[in-house]
């Protein structure tokens, strides 16, 4: 199926609108300066109710620009801020556009060469997962990373509620372990690098009976995700509707033209013969065989065709070609015609539609072609 130029233009506009709307759901870069994190310490302390108390301490160094606030990523949006101190003047949830974590407002706007430390505590849900009724449990945790900053030193400490010997899985191997304290360390992390730890224990005796079995939900996808999906669906439906309306309009025009040609054929024996001969040549060239009812199914058209419908289709194609090539230079005093293996003088749309196949070498004269000839010879 050929799509009209107007529909293509409409689709282009729709695609542009889709891109703009999608970009509107993506947050702009929030960094106001360049920086590195010289020290990043995380302490995890599982609670009897299944929450994990997370304490985060970070030392920052401003390299350029200025930094009035920072963000720190957390495992999911189901947390509450318990306290904050040092250079943090306020810590609040900042869950949006695929990011889950907190925004930390600072006590002042820090400038190049200055260092500052932030510290805060959150109670994090849906991080500890109880696995069985026997209270086996695990934690899979990745500290928030920074795509634009080096981290000189990262340390994660698990204040375990059970003895280290009860753990069935610890990954990676800890840097140190001492009864109920397990430490991991990493140094010189490049921008975007992530450090994941995973532990599993067979001793969940500290967990309350109310802690559910099975993986808790992370709180679902962010609001921006659903907005993006809604935008894509809406634009997709508009494009589908436009294509459908265009096809309906085209089919209606073809049926109307086919009816008019059929009427001409009934009134004009010469016209009837001309169309039928062109139709025969077409089906022979396309190797279209009639079915048991004598009907011709054209795969390229996607339906059964008759001589009148065939003439209407070809004429419609010629009109589109003429519209597309309007303004181009003319040769031999004629628009590009739809002649097939013959020497038509000007088998244009104005020749009545049926002549577009040119079953024989015939000179067709019409007003439009005469004007073009006059321009060419004048």
Image (cartoon, grey):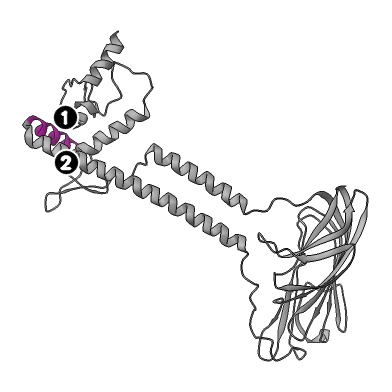
Q: Secondary structure at mark 2?
A: helix
**In the drawing, does residue 132 fall left or right of residue 378?**
right
Residue visible at 13% across and 34% down?
A: 277
Disc assigned to residue 4 = none
Residue visible at 20% across and 38% down?
A: 257
Q: Is residue 285 visible?
A: no
**In the drawing, does residue 310 fall left or right of residue 75?**
left
Viewer-closest of 269 and 247: 247
Give coordinates of residue 374: x percent, y percent: 27, 12
Viewer-closest of 78 and 155: 78
Location of mark 2 (residue): 259
Q: Quadrant of residue 190?
A: bottom right
Residue visible at 23% across and 22% down?
A: 346
| Extent of the magenta region | 270-283
Q: Is residue 125 above or below residue 374?
A: below
Give coordinates of residue 49: x percent, y percent: 74, 85
Q: Is residue 95 above or below residue 321?
A: below
Which of the two marks, 2 or 1, is nearer to us in this view? 2
Image quarter of the C terminus:
top left
Is residue 278 on the magenta stretch? Answer: yes
Residue visible at 76% across and 59% down?
A: 193
Q: Secondary structure at mark 1?
A: loop
Q: Quadrant of residue 45?
A: bottom right
């Amino acid at each position: 199926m050929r799509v009209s130029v107007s529909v293509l233009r409409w689709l282009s506009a729709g695609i542009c609108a889709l891109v703009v709307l999608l970009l509107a759901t993506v947050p702009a870069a929030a960094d106001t300066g360049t920086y590195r994190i010289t020290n990043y310490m995380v302490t995890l302390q599982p609670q009897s109710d299944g929450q994990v108390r997370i304490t985060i301490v970070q030392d920052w160094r401003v390299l350029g620009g200025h930094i009035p606030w920072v963000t720190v990523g957390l495992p999911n949006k189901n947390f509450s801020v318990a306290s904050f101190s040092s250079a943090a003047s306020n810590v609040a949830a900042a869950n949006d556009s695929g990011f889950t974590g907190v925004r930390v407002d600072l006590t002042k706007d820090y400038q190049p060469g200055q260092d500052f430390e932030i510290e805060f505590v959150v109670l994090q849900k849906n991080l500890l997962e109880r696995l069985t009724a026997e209270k086996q449990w695990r934690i899979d945790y990745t500290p928030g990373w920074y795509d634009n900053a080096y981290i000189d030193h990262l340390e994660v400490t698990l204040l375990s509620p059970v003895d280290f010997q009860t753990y069935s899985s610890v990954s990676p191997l800890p840097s140190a372990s001492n009864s109920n304290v397990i430490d991991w360390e990493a140094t010189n992390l490049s921008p975007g690098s992530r450090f994941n730890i995973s532990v599993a224990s067979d001793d969940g005796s500290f967990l309350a009976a109310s802690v559910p079995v099975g993986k808790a939900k992370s709180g679902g996808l962010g609001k921006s995700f659903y907005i993006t999906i809604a935008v894509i669906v809406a634009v997709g439906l508009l494009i589908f509707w436009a294509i459908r309306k265009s096809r309906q309009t085209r089919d209606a025009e073809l049926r109307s033209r086919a009816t008019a040609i059929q009427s001409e054929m009934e009134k004009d024996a010469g016209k009837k013969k001309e169309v039928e001969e062109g139709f025969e040549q077409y089906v022979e060239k396309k190797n279209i065989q009639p079915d048991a009812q004598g009907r011709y199914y054209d795969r390229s058209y996607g339906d059964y065709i008759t001589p009148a419908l065939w003439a209407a289709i070809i004429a419609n194609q010629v009109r589109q070609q003429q519209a597309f090539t309007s303004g181009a230079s003319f040769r031999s005093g004629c628009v590009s015609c739809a002649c097939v293996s013959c020497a038509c003088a000007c088998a244009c749309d104005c020749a009545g539609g049926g002549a577009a196949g040119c079953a024989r070498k015939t000179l067709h004269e019409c007003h439009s072609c005469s004007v073009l000839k006059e321009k060419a010879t004048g």
